[in-house]
Image (spheres, grey):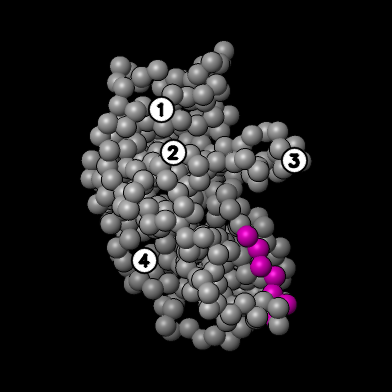
């Protein structure tokens, strides 16, 4: 099935030594229960750039944070979403493995993840996702807000995983898009929250929001933080987290690091044992709740838009995404 009479499309693809913009990529055929989605907007950041350089061994079309419009749904009686503007869960599951049957489908043994693991992404004119993964976007939420739903959901999930007792000290490491959303979400908790980053232009956003912030070179390593959330996407983030967290404190990992997904050799993990530190992994989150927060304008995402580009800009999108002053690049498709 071709979309609106077209058999090929543009797509930003990782396949060889470097990413390329392909102009004649076949329009994907949706499988049973899947929707064919016409992409309208994509948010691109450091994770996409890392994937293009070999993180997780990904091969295929990049992109995972999107807003699109449903063109069609394959082999389904219900066409309720056809023509609708949507966002969606990027994790696709089998529904039959032990994890899925136990209610842990986010950890499906056979899962694929849009633009990250074993599934072509959305930096293309068209892509596919299961219809059950999609959520219609209300007219009151424009594309500039809706495209941040997946990232905001990840921050909400992190807050849900923490047990807040007393008035804990929480430090978020990393001034990328996730870190900047994380401190906005965490600041709603009964906690003292600060962001540690490297780039003055990004730290200035915390000044605007009234959130504590420090440059990484200006902080002490006193092992006095109750919770440290690592959003750096770097092995150095875990190392710094271990220097900041108190004995029996908690480190939450939001980062995917190194091409094989493991900390690089040389990172001393002994403090985790000696100081009895709890380490928690945190991944995706509740899309509907995130979309509702965006509709109520409870977080500032517009300030995270550093540049606007088009899909035709190709590999320059990824180059822009890793510039020091850039939080997110919004791509119009």
N-term mark: 3 or 1: 1
Depth check: give the residue in front, 75 or 144: 75
Farthest residue to the right: give it.
102
Residue 204 appears in the rendering: no
The residue under the point 64% across, 34% down is 94
Horizontal and vertical percent position of residue 218? 43, 84
Q: Secondary structure at mark 2?
A: loop
Q: Which residue is mark 3?
A: 98
N-term mark: 1 or 4: 1
Q: Is residue 276 magenta?
A: yes
Horizontal and vertical percent position of residue 153? 55, 48
Work out whether 129 lies above or below 156. above
Could you tell me how far apart the alpha carbons at marks 3 and 2 are, in whole angstroms? Answer: 25 Å
Q: Which residue is mark 4?
A: 202
Q: Which residue is mark 1?
A: 28
Label 3 vs label 4, nearer the camera: 3
Q: Are marks 3 and 2 in contact (CB under 8 Å)?
A: no
Residue 7 appears in the rendering: yes
Q: Are marks 2 and 1 in contact (CB under 8 Å)?
A: yes
Q: Which residues are magenta?
A: 275-281
In the picture, the quarter occupied by the C terminus is top left
N-term mark: 2 or 1: 1
In the picture, the quarter occupied by the N terminus is top left
Could you tell me how far apart the alpha carbons at marks 3 and 1 are, in whole angstroms? Answer: 30 Å
Q: Secondary structure at mark 1?
A: loop
Label 2 vs label 4, nearer the camera: 2
Q: Which residue is mark 2?
A: 120
């Amino acid at each position: 099935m071709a979309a609106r009479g077209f058999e090929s499309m543009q797509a930003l693809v990782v396949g060889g030594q470097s990413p390329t913009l392909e102009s004649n990529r076949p329009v994907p055929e949706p499988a049973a229960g899947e929707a064919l989605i016409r992409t309208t907007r994509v948010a691109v950041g450091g994770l996409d750039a890392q994937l293009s350089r070999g993180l997780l061994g990904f091969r295929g079309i990049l992109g995972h944070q999107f807003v699109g419009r449903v063109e069609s749904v394959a082999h389904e009686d219900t066409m309720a979403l056809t023509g609708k503007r949507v966002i969606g869960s990027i994790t696709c599951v089998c529904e039959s493995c032990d994890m899925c049957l136990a209610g842990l489908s986010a950890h499906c043994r056979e899962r694929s993840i849009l633009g990250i693991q074993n599934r072509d992404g959305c930096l293309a004119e068209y892509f596919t996702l299961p219809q059950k993964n999609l959520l219609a976007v209300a007219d009151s939420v424009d594309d500039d807000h809706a495209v941040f739903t997946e990232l905001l959901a990840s921050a909400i999930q992190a807050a849900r995983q923490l047990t807040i007792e007393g008035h804990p000290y929480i430090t978020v490491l990393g001034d990328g898009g996730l870190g900047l959303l994380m401190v906005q979400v965490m600041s709603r908790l009964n906690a003292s929250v600060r962001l540690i980053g490297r780039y003055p232009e990004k730290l200035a956003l915390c000044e605007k929001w009234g959130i504590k912030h420090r440059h990484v070179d200006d902080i002490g390593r006193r092992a006095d933080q109750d919770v440290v959330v690592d959003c750096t996407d770097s092995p150095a983030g875990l190392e710094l987290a271990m220097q900041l967290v108190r004995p029996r404190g908690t480190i939450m990992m939001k980062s995917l690091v190194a091409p094989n997904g493991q900390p690089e050799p040389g990172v001393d993990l002994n403090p985790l044992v000696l100081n009895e530190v709890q380490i928690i992994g945190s991944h995706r989150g509740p899309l509907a709740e995130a979309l509702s927060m965006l509709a109520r304008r409870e977080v500032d995402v517009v300030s995270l838009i550093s540049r606007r580009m088009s899909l035709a800009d190709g590999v320059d999108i990824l180059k822009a995404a890793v510039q020091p002053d850039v939080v997110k690049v919004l791509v119009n498709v």
